Image (cartoon, grey):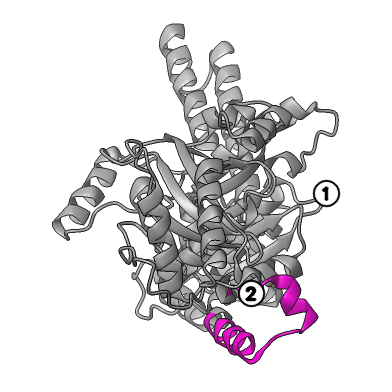
C-alpha cells in the first residue's frame, strides 16, 4: 500500500511543483519513501526542483531524462513511471494526508528497529551486547524522542532564520504588517492588518452587522492584497451574501435590487459596482456550511484553494462559532464552543493564515447591548467566555445609543428645515468596535473605533477612533452629516440660515 501512496504523491509533485514546497513545509522527508523504484524517481524529481538538473521544468519527460543521466532508468523504473503518469493528480489536501500516513509508517519502522535492538541487547548479541544498560537505555530513549518529535513537529527551523527575515525586512524599510484592511484605516493601524497565524474573534448582538462587517474585511483584503478568501457561513446562503456584497458596494437596499424597482441612478450604481466586484470576487469563495463542514474539512478545502491559486497566503472567515459542527455530537454547548475555539486557534497556526470567527452573544449580553447602559464583552459569548483566552484578538461590536439618537435628532432637524426629505433619511446606527484583546498591539492607539452602519444597505463606514475625553458630540455629528453629504449618501437642499460645519474630520474613512 505504501508504494501506491508514494506513486500518488509523485504524481502530485510532477503535476504541480507547488505541492513540493508545501509538502516540505508540512515536514515531508524523502526518507519516508520505502519502495526502491519510487525512491529513485523522487530523487530525480527533487534534483530538478532544487536546480541540480540541466532543465528546471518538472514533467515526465524531464524526469525520464534525469533518471537516464543518473544511469538508473531501466525497464522496471520506466514501468513505474508509466503507472504514475496514468494516475489522476490528487488534490493538495489529499497529498498532505498521504504524507502524514507515510510519516506514521516511518515512525513505526523506527520503533520496530528499536525493538529488535532491545531484543538483541537483552539476549547479549548484536552491536549493543557489550554496552552498559544505562548507556543503552539513554540512547534508546533519545531515539524514541526523535520519533515523537518527527511526528508532532512539521519542520524545525532555528530561530536565527526568523531573526534573519526580520532584519532583512527592516533593511528593506519594511515593517511587519498583516493583510491590509484599508480603508478601515483606524482598525488597520490598531491591528497591524490581519496577520498570518492570528485568530480574530468578533462578537456582537443580533442586528449589529457582524456578518456584514466580515464581508467588508474580506473584500478589503482582496482589494489590497489579491489573495484568496474563504468565507464559511452556517446562517446565510451564498446568494444572499453575494447580494449583500453588491448592496454594500452600491449602497442600495438588497430588497430594492431583488424587486428590480430601480431608477436610472440606481441602475448605473449597480453596473459600476458589478464591474468593480467582478474581478475581486474571483478571489472570494463563499461556502454554505453544512453538518459535514467540520474544521478538519475546512482545512482540506483551504489546502486545495492554496493549490489552485498557487499561494500559501489565504484568509478564513467563519460565521459563526456556535454553529460550526463537531464530530462529537454529545457535547454540551459550552464543551462544543471550547473545543471549536481551541481548534480555530490551532488551525490559524497550522495554516499560517488569519482566521476571523464570529461569536453570538448570550441573552445577558444582548440585553446589555439593547439597553445601552453597560456594554457586553466577549465573556458574554454564547457557550462561555473562553473564546477570548483562545483568540489573539477579541473584538465586540456594540451600538452607541446616545450618539445614534443624536444623529437621528440631527436628521429630524434637517427634515423640519426642509433640507432633507423624510423618505431619504438613512437608517443608520453608530457602532462602537471595542478591541478588548490585541496581542502584540502597537503602543498609543485607542481600543475603540467607531463606524456608521447603514442597516438597509449593509454598509459600514469607519468614523475613526472614539475620543474618550469628548463630552459633547454636537460637532462630531455635524461633521458626519457634512461627510455624508460630500459622499452623496444624503442630498441636502441649501439653507442660508444653516451654518456649514467643517467638512471631514480625522479618521472618517468611507469604504
Which of the 4 image quarters holds residue 339? top right
Q: Residue at x 39, y 40 (%)?
A: 156
Mark 2 vs 1, N-terminal side: 2
Q: Secondary structure under badge 2?
A: loop
Main secondary-structure element of the magenta-colored stretch: helix
Q: Residue at x 73, y 76 (%)?
A: 256
Q: Name the residue under label 1.
A: 291
Is 440 rendered above or below residue 353?
Answer: above
Residue 181, image x, y percentages: 43, 59
Q: Secondary structure under badge 1?
A: loop
Which of the 4 image quarters holds residue 39? bottom right
Instruction: Classify 10 Å Cα crowding around label 1: few (below 14), some (14-19), many (20 and above).
Output: few
Does 57 sit left or right of 203 as displayed?
left
- The answer to whether residue 70 of the structure is visible from this angle is no
Q: Nearer the viewer, mark 2 or mark 1?
A: 2
Residue 421, image x, y percentages: 60, 73
* CA gap, disc 2 and disc 1: 33 Å
287 or 236, nearer to the observer: 236
Q: Name the residue under label 2.
A: 252
502 or 131, nearer to the observer: 502
140 or 286, nearer to the observer: 286
Does 334 sit left or right of 229 as displayed?
right
Is 221 rendered above or below residue 1?
Answer: below
Q: Residue at x 61, y 55 (%)?
A: 35
Instruction: Classify 10 Å Cα crowding around label 2: few (below 14), some (14-19), many (20 and above).
Output: many
Does 278 sit left or right of 140 as displayed?
right
Residue 14, image x, y percentages: 55, 72
Query: Does the stretch in magenta take in 477?
Result: no
- The residue at the far bottom in this view is 264
Q: Which residue is drawn at 62% across and 36% down?
A: 369
Q: What stretch is highlighted in magenta?
A: 251-276
Residue 345, image x, y percentages: 55, 38
Amino acid at each position: 500500500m505504501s508504494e501506491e501512496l508514494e506513486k500518488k504523491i509523485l504524481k502530485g509533485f510532477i503535476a504541480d511543483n507547488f505541492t513540493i514546497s508545501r509538502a516540505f513545509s508540512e515536514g515531508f522527508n524523502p526518507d519516508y519513501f520505502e519502495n526502491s523504484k519510487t525512491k529513485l524517481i523522487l530523487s530525480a524529481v527533487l534534483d530538478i526542483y532544487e536546480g541540480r538538473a540541466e532543465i528546471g521544468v518538472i514533467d515526465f519527460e524531464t524526469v525520464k531524462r534525469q533518471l537516464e543521466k543518473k544511469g538508473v532508468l531501466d525497464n522496471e523504473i520506466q514501468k513505474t513511471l508509466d503507472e504514475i503518469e496514468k494516475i489522476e493528480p490528487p488534490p493538495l489536501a489529499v497529498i498532505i494526508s498521504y504524507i502524514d500516513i507515510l510519516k506514521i509508517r516511518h515512525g513505526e519502522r523506527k520503533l520496530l528497529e528499536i525493538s529488535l535492538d532491545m531484543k538483541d541487547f537483552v539476549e547479549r548479541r548484536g552491536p549493543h551486547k557489550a554496552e552498559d544498560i544505562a548507556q543503552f537505555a539513554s540512547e534508546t530513549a533519545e531515539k524514541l524522542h526523535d520519533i515523537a518529535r518527527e511526528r508532532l513537529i512539521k519542520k524545525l527551523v532555528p530561530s536565527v532564520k526568523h531573526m534573519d527575515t526580520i532584519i532583512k525586512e527592516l533593511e528593506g524599510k519594511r515593517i511587519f504588517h498583516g493583510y491590509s484592511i484599508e480603508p478601515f484605516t483606524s482598525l488597520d493601524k490598531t491591528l497591524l492588518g490581519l496577520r498570518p497565524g492570528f485568530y480574530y474573534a468578533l462578537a456582537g448582538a443580533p442586528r449589529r452587522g457582524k456578518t456584514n462587517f466580515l464581508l467588508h474585511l474580506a473584500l478589503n483584503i482582496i482589494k489590497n492584497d489579491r489573495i484568496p478568501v474563504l468565507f464559511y457561513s452556517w446562517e446565510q446562503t451564498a446568494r444572499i451574501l453575494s447580494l449583500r456584497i453588491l448592496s454594500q458596494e452600491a449602497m442600495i437596499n438588497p430588497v430594492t435590487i431583488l424587486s428590480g424597482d430601480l431608477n436610472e441612478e440606481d441602475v448605473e450604481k449597480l453596473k459600476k459596482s458589478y464591474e468593480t466586484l467582478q474581478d475581486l470576487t474571483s478571489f472570494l469563495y463563499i461556502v454554505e456550511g453544512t453538518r459535514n463542514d467540520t474544521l478538519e474539512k475546512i482545512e482540506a478545502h483551504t489546502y486545495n484553494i492554496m493549490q489552485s491559486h498557487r499561494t500559501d497566503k489565504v484568509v478564513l472567515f467563519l460565521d459563526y462559532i456556535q454553529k460550526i459542527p463537531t464530530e462529537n455530537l454529545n457535547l454540551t454547548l459550552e464543551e462544543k464552543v471550547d473545543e471549536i475555539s481551541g481548534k480555530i486557534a490551532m488551525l490559524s497556526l497550522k495554516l499560517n493564515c488569519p482566521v476571523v470567527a464570529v461569536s453570538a452573544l448570550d441573552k445577558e449580553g444582548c440585553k446589555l447591548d439593547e439597553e445601552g447602559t453597560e456594554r457586553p464583552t466577549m465573556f458574554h459569548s454564547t457557550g462561555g467566555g473562553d473564546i477570548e483566552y483562545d483568540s489573539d484578538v477579541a473584538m465586540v461590536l456594540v451600538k452607541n445609543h446616545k450618539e445614534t439618537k443624536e444623529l437621528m435628532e440631527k436628521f429630524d432637524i434637517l427634515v423640519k428645515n426642509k433640507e432633507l426629505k423624510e423618505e431619504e433619511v438613512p437608517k443608520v446606527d453608530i457602532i462602537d468596535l471595542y478591541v478588548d484583546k490585541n496581542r502584540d498591539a502597537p503602543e498609543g492607539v485607542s481600543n475603540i473605533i467607531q463606524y456608521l452602519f447603514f442597516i438597509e444597505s449593509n454598509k459600514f463606514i469607519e468614523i475613526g477612533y472614539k475620543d474618550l475625553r469628548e463630552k459633547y458630540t454636537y460637532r462630531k455629528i455635524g461633521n458626519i452629516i457634512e461627510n455624508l453629504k460630500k459622499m452623496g449618501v444624503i442630498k441636502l437642499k441649501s439653507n442660508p440660515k444653516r451654518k456649514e460645519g467643517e467638512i471631514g474630520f480625522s479618521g472618517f474613512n468611507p469604504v
